[in-house]
Image (cartoon, coloured by chain):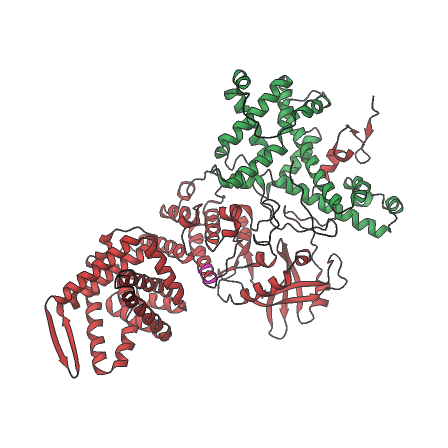
Amino acid sequence: MSDSEPTSAGGPAPRSPVFVTTHWSVVLTAGGGDTTGARRALEKLCQTYWYPLYAYVRRRSFTPQDAEDLTQDFFARFLEHDWVANADREKGRFRTFLLSALNHFLSNEWDKARAQKRGGGAPLLPLQFDTAETRYTREPADGVTPEQAFERRWALTLLETVTRRLGAEYDQAGKADLFAALNPCLVGDRTAQPYEELAKKLSLNEGAVKSAVHRLRQRYRLLLREEIANTVASPGDVEEELRHLVAVLGGRA
Amino acid sequence: METERICPNCHKPLAPDMPLGLCPECLLKAGLNTGPEPATGSSASSGFVPPTVADLAKLFPQLEILEFIGKGGMGAVYKARQPGLDRLVALKILPPSAASGLGFAERFNREARALARLNHPNIVTVHDFGQVAAGALPNAPAGTLHYLIMEYVDGGNLRQIERAGQFTPEQALAIVPQICEALQFAHNEGIVHRDIKPENILMDKRGRVKITDFGIAKILGLTADNAPLTGARDVVGTPHYMAPEQIEKPRTVDHRADIYSLGVVFYEMLTGELPIGRFAPPSRKVQVDVRLDEVVLHALEKEPELRYQQASQVKTAVENIANTSARALNAPGPEARPNPDALERQIAARDYHLYIGSCIRRGWALVRRDFWSTLGVTWLVLVLLAAAASFGQTTHHHGVMTFDTSVLSALLSGPLMGGLNYFLLMRIRGQHVGAEAAFAGFKASLVHLFLAGFVTEVLTVLGFACLILPGIYLLVAWSFTLPLVIDKGLEFWPAMRISRRTVTRHWWQVAALALVLFLLAVSGVLACGIGIAVTVPVSMAAFMYAYEDIFN
């Protein structure tokens, strides 16, 4: 879905992406002018975060078939009609903007009958609806509102994207085993990791394990912030968005 | 039925299908800035851990490392002293990971040398640069550490000042011209900054603006020609301050991208917000002169061709607005003429260097842009002048010289040429004036223009008559009298004085300019005589650009 970057030779050395052009800020800066860069950025964003929308729609008690049509139709309109022109600084987050655009779409534009007639053209985004429904049914069916389901799914999608990129980086460097062994160390405090055990398992000395874990956590943190930065308007918002998503997953938002 | 797993960290039940099989809440929390791990607040945090002061002291025995100032994406900066010269400097260490790219050393040397040429009061000077063997420094994987020794600026950057309190429009109007001067200087040297933003604009305690990190992006190899082809991720620049072409077509970026970034910074200084999406003009957000809207919007044009083409143009526009609004506030009296002494001091304070080639290029661009109007107006005035000259011609003999002069042409040359200068000047400054502006000489300052023209001509003729050389000297020295009268509204004698004094500081440069422009104008004859129709306006426009560079 989102591109994983080839890292420089010699493992996932923290190549300093000193400046990043984040997708959402590219879109906002284009300000409704449909430049190719902005359109590509928007497409990338939609391709990454379509599933939370699907989950939201299903939560709103649409049938799977309707949900599929609706999601597809929405994205087609979204990319076509360039609603981003109405995005201003207040709607700093792609997440909130997307949801409000969908609600607007639902109340004003989506006509079931129209969707059924559409049929002919190929979908603009290759979205995997076949697996979407399966995923959805495996979701815990607790009493959350559709909005909460959307946000929760959003946070999870974000994490999936980041961990996938991280894994791919290590994979390309030929260190897939290392990644598999070390990734539990991503959670928890730095000091609370089972360095001794890992050292034995990987036949490395403890110092080497510590620095490998350190590098992994650093890289994860960087990728996470990059991915969040893709959906917010300015670098300062990343921290706030991260905290919000933590609260969402903790069931407190 | 799957047995429920528990997260080892927070002990909450772990749902299936979680990323990496880990607890998502804990995973996300791990991304926050907690604990002693060196994670900076900026989203562009790299794996770069800056060396400690003690480490650096070992690597730089010739410096006295005082303290760590800060870290940005472009490296870490330390305050240091050069004991021999007893001066404070800023030592900047570039991230070692950046230095591992191909061709880095060569790029570093080339760019640093170019930077060292940027000697300007509003640009942070680079004193020295090089690399040291880092040896066994922790977190520095490779052997060499690249560094720059730069001027130390005792003050903060615009972002810090902004956070402390909003800029007043007056402050913004005082800062922007300095930025423009720095940019124009660098652009004349062929150097584009590419990363103008508040963090890179420093201000010392005396209120002097200094731009830093010029070309650092190029050194670090983060420009388009070096970026890997994977998507739009590594394009240099901070997103909001980047010109659209830096994102869309990075290979076509030129100095006009800096002008766009300047526009963003200007807008932010005035309104406190970034110009994103559909943004309101500054005058609708804060209490500022409406004319500033046009300046800001002109700088923020998406197409480079539609923007201001030179930083100096932005400066002139802003200063005009600042001056006229100040005058409106402070001088209700009939004092319409500026104080010549103050003006002279102001001009004398800024030394100048003439770039003849640049003037000609810009003159050519101006003519090309407004082809028919510039050509038409120039030739209209010249034809009128010629007509006046042939009207009532009298011949004088003086020794071996014969002069055909006409009183009428002597009378009219001042206002006519002054008007033409004014017309070209307005076009240079991006203000679309009609052909009638060429006759502005007859409305404003008529007496002074006529006097200036008349007196200059008479005195120069006398100078020529007595000895050729003084004549040439005076001719060159007084060449800017007319523009000074019509542009600055000076009286003719002060204008002549200022012109002479300013020119004599670099007489040879001005003389060279005059000679080149004269040859250029005349060379048009070579192109079957018609070429002169173009070369004359071009050299006149080039002359006006030179005037702008020297006096504005």
Say whether residue B50 is left or right of residue B285: right
Outermost residue, bottom direction?
Answer: B399
Q: Is residue B184 magenta?
A: yes
Question: Foreground residue, B393 or B25?
Answer: B393
Query: What type of secondary structure mainly makes up the magenta span?
Result: helix
Chain letter for the part of the structure drawn in red? B
Image quadrant where residue B338 sits: bottom left
Chain letter for the part of the structure drawn in green? A
Q: Relative to residue A62, is residue B366 depicted above or below?
A: below
Image quadrant where residue A179 sits: top right
Say whether residue B366 is left or right of residue B379: right
Q: Residue at x 53, y 63 (%)?
A: B124
Outermost residue, top direction?
Answer: A113
Quarter of the picture holding the N terminus of chain B: top right
Q: Residue at x 42, y 56 (%)?
A: B311
Question: Foreground residue, B243 or B171?
Answer: B243
Q: Relative to residue A36, is residue B90 depicted above or below?
A: below
Span colored in magenta? B182-186
Q: Residue B548 at what x, y percent from top left?
A: 35, 62
Question: Foreground residue, A55 or B105?
Answer: B105
Q: Relative to residue B266, is residue A159 depicted above or below?
A: above
Residue A100 seen in render: no
